[in-house]
Structure formats: structure tokens, C-alpha cells
Amino acid sequence: MRRTWLYAGILVTLFASNAANAQEAPGRTATPGLLSDFGQTLDDDGIRVRAQLINEMAANPIGGIKQGNTDAGQAQIGLSFDLHKLVGIPGGQFHVSWIRSYGDSDAKNFSGDFIKSQEVYKNAFHPFRMSIFAYEQKLFDDKLDVLVGRLGSSAFYGRLSNTCYSESGITCGVPQLMNSESNITFPTSATWGGNVRYHFTKDIAFQTGAFEVNSFIQHTNGYDFSTDKATGVSTFEEVSFGNYDLTNYRYPGDIKFGGWVSTAPFSDPYFNTKGQSLGLFGGTAAANTSLRNGIYIMGEKAVWRPDPALEKSVTVIAGYNQSLETEEIASMQVFTGAVARGVIPGREHDIVSLTGTYIDLTSREIEFLRDSRIKAGGHGVNNPNEFALEADYSALLFNSARVAPNISYIINPDNSNIPKTKILPQNIVTFGIKITFNLATFLGLPLAPNLSD
């Protein structure tokens, strides 16, 4: 693990030395990339590239079940093909991506908390896998957008433009409750699905989608297209108003209303197959066959921007997620925060992010953790009212790289990730560093649409 931190320090140092004092916005370069001419040729021919590395290190020196540190990351490569330019199909595109995950989770190994310390950590299986494999068709002057194939539903629902400058799973990707309880899928384990979005106006849109639930895909390299191990279907709906676009609006903002229903059975948080306490008697968790469903509302709004020609601004975010059944780890999550761009003199593209959340744990989860603690020889009951705060500073090193040190604090933590312990966890302090590097931008290649985390 010491080597990981050392390598990260070397990487940051190299980035900084190459960057000099360049402060370019993402997607723009002060000097052409090494392959800019080739990139222009690709773009002219209808080929765009995605190539990105995300690395997140986290350590909890205080609190949780035990103290430790881990490193987790994800490398992604892929292509998008404009089928109008290539074969004459107006509005058609084809997308394909491969992903390689690595590393481990601080929350699963040390802190034990329900909230992920590293949002990039998706599962314990890390083969180099094909993730996105999808056809897209736009119709009616691009008002209608249809995607079918192997997709991650997290690319479409429960997302805001300003919630992923943090490292933890409070809001990044999708809010933690939705991540845990909607059977939403990520591109690391993309499943068969389809999504339809219709823009009534440029600022009002509705979308709906249905996606296979198939956790076995996590074990595979992504080339098995069978649905034999599917356990159900998750559907999502969302209506959005507004458009968070700093380029075309001085005070951009949007608000989204959505919900989900999933038919796949899931493990009961308290009962085993004999109807006994899983924590006290062990055994296999009972399969719960009730529908999993929930709703959400979330939004973001720029509230301060002294010069519309600059990114310098402050944006506020807020959201509410509610599970509509009780057989879950958490029943409700509320989050809020603020994102400040360019407020540090001489660092006009750096970003300061503050995020806070409240999570209400269900009575079944509290009782399961209590019984598990008694079985392990301990005592004490978790407080169902959990709060988490995180502060991040995202420094743009050059047009394709960011480094973001951060600190988070969890009040009344649970231990849902490490239930078999006699310890009642104390408040958790976690330090982290998130590094993102976009190789496509660095090389001057045309950027493909973002269909993954």
C-alpha cells in the first residue's frame, strides 16, 4: 500500500511539472495534443474516443470498525462511431467500451460503513471486461434519443452535473441510497437494457428505461451476452427541467424528479430462511420478493457568477431520495452542498466542493446489526440517524488531469459492511486523494459521449 501512495505522489509531481502554470478548462488545450492531427482525422471520419483513469485512495485513521487504507481505481477505453458519417445512417451511433477495475474498498475492509469511501469501487471482481455495447438512434431533429444494448443505467438516472467532485459515495455516481436499493447498474457490470429520452423543449425532457438485473455479470469478462442468470428487471423514469450549462447560461440550473421499480428478489436485512434473526442464528438471508421501489428529487443552481465570461461561480445542490419499502438498509437520504469554481486567485479552473448528507437507517438494519454484535460478544445499538460531511479541493493540473485531496466525517456511523463484529463504531474521519486523467484529451483525440462513470 505504501507503494501505491508513492506512485501516486510521483504521478502528481509529473503532472504538475508538465503543467507548469497552465490552467486550461477541460476539453481545451493551450498546446495541441501529441495526436491532434490524427484526432482531427478521426473526428472528420465520425470516430470519437473515451480513455480515462480514475484512482481513489482512502484512509480512515479515526473511527469505524478498524483503521486502514486502500486504493481503488478504474481504467476505461472505448470508441463511439457516428454512423451518419461512416455508413450514411442519420442520427445513428454505436458505442463500445472496455473497463478494468482494480483495488479494494476502505468501507468494506476497515470503516465498515454503508457509505462508500471510494465511489469508484463497484465490486470485488476485476477482469478486463467489455462494458458498454450499444446502438443509439436520434430522431425528430434530435428530440428523441433511443439507446439499446449493454448499458449502465447509472449513466441516465439520479445524476447531477456537480455531484461528482467528491470521492465518497454520498452523491457521486448516484446517491448512496439509490446505489444500494434500486438495482441500478454501473458500466463496470453493464446489463441488457434500453433507454428512451424525449426533449419537449431544450430545457424540458422525459426519459424512461428498463434494464436487466444480473449480478453474475460482475464475475465475467462481459462477452457472455446470455440472460440465463438474470433475476429481474429494473425500470426508471425521470423528468427534468432546466439545463446546467455554464457556456450558454449565466446562472444555469436544473431540477429532476424520478423513481424506480425493480422486480428482482433481494436479501432480507434481518430474517434468515427459517424466519429467525440472521444476526443471532446465522444461516442464509431470506429472499425478499417484494417490489423494490423509490422516488427522488434533486437539483442544482448557480447562485453567484460575477462575470458570465468566466467559470468563476458558486452552485448549490440538493436532493431527496426515499425508498418506498422497509426491507432495506436505509429508508431515506437527504443531501445538500455547494460547488465553487475559480474562487482561488490564480486558479480559475480549480473547484472546491462541500457535501453533506443525512441517512435514515431502517429498523430491520439496526436490529440486524444489534443481533450480530450480540452474537460476536459485544453490545450496543447503532443510531439510525447517520450524517456525513465531505470537503474536496479539485486542482486542475492541466487540461486532462485533476487531483483532489479530501476529508470526510461520518457521525453515528453504521457497520453494514462489517456486521460480524462486537465493536460499536465510533465517528469516522477519512482522508482521500482522487486523481482523474483523461488520456484522450491529453493526446488531442476527439471525446466520445460519456456513458459511464
Image (cartoon, helix red, strand yellow):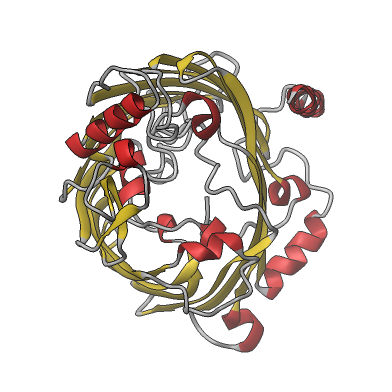
Q: Residue at x 81, y 59 (%)?
A: 37
Query: Seen in the image, is 224 located left or right of residue 65?
Result: right
Label count reads: 0
Residue 436, position as x, y percentages in the image:
64, 37
Extreme residue toward the bottom, this view: 88
Query: Seen in the image, is 57 located left or right of residue 185?
Result: right
Q: Is residue 271 visible?
A: yes
In the image, residue 369 above or below residue 186: above
Q: Residue at x 32, y 57 (%)?
A: 266
Image quadrant of residue 39? bottom right
Residue 367, position as x, y percentages in the image:
23, 32
Image quadrant of residue 337? top left
Residue 74, position as x, y percentages in the image:
64, 46
Image quadrant of residue 426? top left
In the image, residue 409 above or below residue 143: above
Query: Which of the two residues, 270 or 305, is positioned nearer the viewer here?
Result: 270
